[in-house]
């Protein structure tokens, strides 16, 4: 299944706490300089030069200048994911649309630290490459599906088990659940899908009901194997109205990392 949605900064604001500055953690404001958007350090507000800004759908990328300014010199049609990567900073992604070309935006990124770890900064497509034009983000997907699930093994080092540990999904689109439909994230009238599921070491820890950015999932401390192999698995949902065969929901996600506050 697939999707058309226009969640944008709205979902971003719902899922991410605001801060005193004019931008959000892993977030976006509409304040820019002239016709240029900007990448800034979330804590200092200073421009971050040499950050790589990517629109995977368009296969487009550019770099911020020495003061953090950049321009998206490409056509944006519909909702898409924008990724920002910079050495020594947490990977960041946000869902944007064509309005990003008409008004500058400011993106606040946060430095990496010993209490966090990047798991994967790539984009992945889960599902069966079979989706409706009415489903969320229809027309946005460019890469082929890797199948109905994603799984990765890793070690969590320097983790403080006396503090909360979160798995953060930078951006996720294409979800066709009943809840996503009810808030206008897709336009399918006769079907909906079960939510994507997130597993940690084989244990279900979350179901993702809506599309959005910066979704944090608390990991129960008792499931964590410190300095041993751990595993994260994300499984896409299924069309609950289709019983003749398994019809997987097509979704895409990008940027997985851990935070340990």
Image: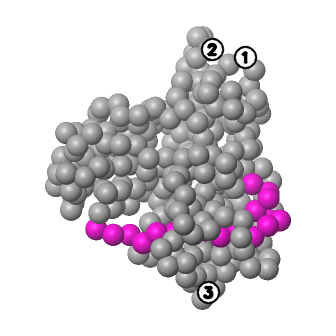
Residue displayed at 55% across by 82% down: 46
Q: How is the image coloured?
A: one colour
| Distance of label 3 from label 2 (alpha carbons) | 52 Å
Residue displayed at 75% across by 20% down: 189
> Which disc number belongs to residue 152?
none
107 relative to 228 in the view: left or right? right
- The reply to whether callout 2 and callout 1 are in contact (CB within 8 Å) is yes
Instruction: Look at discs 1 and 3 and give the one toward the viewer.
Output: 3
Residue to which mark 2 is pinned: 241
Q: Is residue 182 above or below residue 82?
A: above
Q: Quadrant of the N terminus?
A: top right
Mark 3 lies on a secondary structure that is: loop
* Image coords of residue 40 (percent x, y): 57, 76
Residue displayed at 68% across by 28% down: 181
The image quadrant of residue 53 is: bottom right
Return the residue found at the far top: 244
* Image coords of residue 138 (percent x, y): 73, 39
> Which disc number belongs to residue 67?
3
Residue to which mark 1 is pinned: 190
| Distance of label 2 from label 1 (alpha carbons) | 8 Å
Q: Earlier in the sequence, mark 3 or mark 2?
A: 3
Q: From where the camera sits, is residue 83 visible?
A: no
Which residues lie in the magenta part?
97-114
């Amino acid at each position: 299944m697939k999707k058309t949605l226009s969640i944008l900064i709205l979902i971003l604001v719902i899922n991410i706490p605001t801060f005193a500055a004019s931008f959000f953690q892993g977030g976006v404001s509409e304040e820019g300089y002239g016709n240029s958007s900007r990448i800034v350090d979330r804590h200092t507000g200073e421009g971050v030069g040499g950050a790589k800004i990517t629109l995977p759908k368009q296969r487009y990328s550019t770099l911020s200048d020495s003061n953090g300014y950049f321009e998206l010199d490409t056509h944006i049609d519909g909702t898409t994911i924008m990724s920002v990567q910079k050495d020594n900073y947490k990977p960041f992604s946000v869902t944007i649309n064509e309005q990003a070309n008409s008004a500058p935006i400011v993106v606040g990124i946060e430095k990496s630290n010993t209490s966090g770890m990047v798991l994967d900064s790539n984009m992945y497509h889960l599902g069966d490459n079979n989706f409706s034009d009415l489903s969320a983000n229809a027309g946005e997907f460019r890469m082929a599906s890797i199948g109905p699930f994603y799984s990765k093994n890793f070690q969590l080092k320097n983790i403080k088990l006396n503090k909360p540990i979160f798995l953060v999904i930078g951006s996720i689109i294409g979800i066709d659940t009943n809840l996503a439909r009810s808030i206008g994230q897709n336009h399918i009238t006769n079907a909906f899908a079960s939510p994507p599921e997130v597993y940690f070491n084989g244990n279900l820890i979350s179901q993702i009901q809506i599309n959005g950015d910066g979704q944090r999932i608390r990991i129960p401390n008792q499931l964590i194997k410190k300095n041993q192999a751990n595993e994260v698995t994300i499984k896409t949902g299924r069309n609950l109205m289709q019983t003749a065969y398994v019809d997987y929901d097509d979704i895409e996600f990008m940027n997985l990392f851990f935070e340990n506050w």
